[in-house]
Image: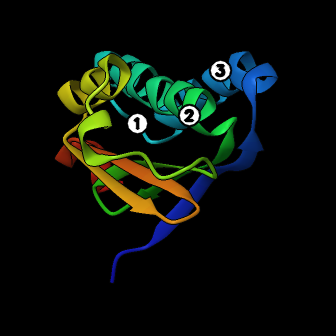
Amino acid sequence: MTSTRTLLDRTFGLPDLPALRAALGDCAIASELPRQRGEEFVLAAYELLAHAIEHGGGGQVRVHRAGGQLRCQVRDCGPALPAGTMNGCGLGVARALADQLDITRHCDGTTTTMAMNIPVAQARR
């Protein structure tokens, strides 16, 4: 059975970005991602937050460690964007850095979930 540990769960808007960037770094450290991967996690997650602010005015961010992954889920309440608009620069950065990126459009917004694998030595702890 895989245990899930919630590290961050809050609503956000533009004024919250600086504090959230620091909180994302704390999540990466708590999950024992290697330093470079931790920095990549922060950058990718930050891009998801910026995307949610640009297209939905903000939203909800949840970060949790589940098994061997650190996962960041961002949900906004903006209008569902057409599929062709889901390839912007920020999402491209997140897609390039993450081990997994899923985008789900809803009638009342979009949920984007990214995951980074935690190296086996750290995941066993």
Q: Name the mark on residue 22.
A: 3
Quadrant in the rendering for residue 56: top right
Q: Nearer the viewer, mark 3 or mark 1?
A: 3
Upstream in sequence: badge 3 or badge 2: 3
Q: Nearer the viewer, residue 92 or 28?
A: 92
**Gap in angstroms between the C-alphas marked 3 and 2:** 23 Å
| Amino acid type of the residue tagged 1 in the rendering | Glu
x then y, percent, for residue 1: 33, 84
Q: Nearer the viewer, residue 105 or 45?
A: 105
Q: Name the mark on residue 55.
A: 2
In this rendering, is residue 81 above or below 4?
above
Q: Residue at x 18, y 48 (%)?
A: 120
Upstream in sequence: badge 3 or badge 1: 3
In this rendering, is residue 66 above or below 110?
below
- Give yes or no for contact between labels 3 and 2 (Cβ–Cβ under 8 Å): no
In the image: residue 53, left or right of residue 113:
right
Question: What is the crowding at mark 1: few (fewer than 14 residues within 10 Å), some, or many (at least 20)?
Answer: some
Q: Nearer the viewer, mark 2 or mark 1?
A: 2
Q: Residue at x 75, y 32 (%)?
A: 13
x then y, percent, for residue 111: 46, 55
- Give yes or no for contact between labels 2 and 1 (Cβ–Cβ under 8 Å): no
Q: Residue at x 48, y 68 (%)?
A: 4
Q: Residue at x 31, y 35 (%)?
A: 85
In this rendering, is residue 103 above or below 50?
below
What residue is pinned by disc 1?
A: 32
The residue lying furthest to the right in this view is 15
In this rendering, is residue 2 above or below 35?
below
Question: What is the crowding at mark 2: few (fewer than 14 residues within 10 Å), some, or many (at least 20)?
Answer: some
The residue lying furthest to the bottom in this view is 1
| Amino acid type of the residue tagged 3 in the rendering | Ala
